[in-house]
Image (cartoon, rainbow, N blue to C red):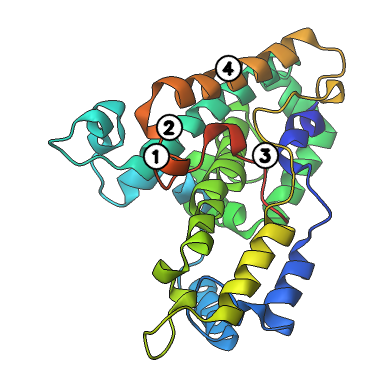
Amino acid sequence: PLRRLLDAFISRSVQATNDNMRLLFDFHAADFSLAPLPHDEQLKLIDDAIKKNPLNLAEMDMERYGQIRHMDPAWSTREAITNTSRWGWRWHYRAVTVQRLIAKYVECFLEAEGMDEDFIKADSYLTNWWHSLVFHLPSLRRATEKSPSWSGSGSEASRSQLIRVLSTIMVWVSWIHEDVGHSAAAYVNNPIYTPMCVPEDGVGVPLRSWVFNAMAYRGFVFLHRSVLLDEPPAFWFDGNVESRKCFETFQDSLRSLGETDVAFSECDKNGFFSCVDRVETAVSS
């Protein structure tokens, strides 16, 4: 059941992390990417960030993300977004709203599959998977060390921990990746406002830089991939009608946001955010 729950968020194209890194840093494609820095400087910044500010998955949970940064929860509400006389934290409101939908889906799926607290603790396969996840995912391992009240100690998983951890990972690899990553495609079509396309003398648009990025985005970034609102394949549910209903309820809720919530309709010509019906299920690698 757990593999089927994860399938929607790990089913990808043939792209892989190693290939992307090789393109960016072995072939120096990073010199023409969104960051206006040489590839070796970008690598140094990445290395510095890993060493000085290592990620803690508990702090990436959208329910805690704003609190840790001393942001007023009232800023991440629909009321704040629709009130033109006050400031609203649109990006976080969108992200936390979607994570809550994902958390409801995960909870619903676990219940539909009979994965209650006793089942989770007794299932040796799930326990081994959890240990492997803690070992191979540094941000989760760090959470077990620094934020055990959120993730547990790492020795065993509980139902609430599974929901928190999985919904956090899922919202980052799908929704947030789309909002802060692919939404930058608008820059490719408006190179005048893009750091990578600003010439040293400030005149015109560098042809080589713009052509590379335009072709890269259209050639291997914007490929046809599965999106959150696609018709789900039957094997995700293995004949379990209730499990499928959980996913369809999640899709209906997400679709409704795009139709009724202004913060989720600011895409294409209406804004710089991602359209609900185009958000992919997971990142490229």
The mark lying in front, picked from 1 and 3, is 1
Q: Which residue is mark 3?
A: 281
| Badge 3 element | loop
Do callouts 2 and 3 mark residues in contact (Cβ within 8 Å)? no
Do callouts 1 and 3 mark residues in contact (Cβ within 8 Å)? no
* Dot placed on the residue nearer the N-terminal end, 2 or 3: 2
Q: Is residue 166 left or right of residue 225?
A: left
Label 4 sits on what residue type? Asp
Using the image as rendered, state which of residue 265 and residue 202 is in the foreground.
202
* Dot placed on the residue nearer the N-terminal end, 2 or 1: 2
Label 3 sits on what residue type? Thr
* Dot placed on the residue nearer the N-terminal end, 2 or 4: 4
The outermost residue toward the left is 85
Q: Which residue is mark 1?
A: 270
| Badge 1 element | helix
Category of crowding for the residue at label 2, using alpha-carbon neighbours closer than 10 angstroms: few (below 14), some (14–19), many (at least 20): some
The residues bearing labels 2 and 1 have C-alpha atoms spaced at a distance of 7 Å
The residues bearing labels 4 and 1 have C-alpha atoms spaced at a distance of 22 Å
Question: Residue 218 at x, y = what percent?
Answer: 68, 58
Q: Which residue is mark 2?
A: 265
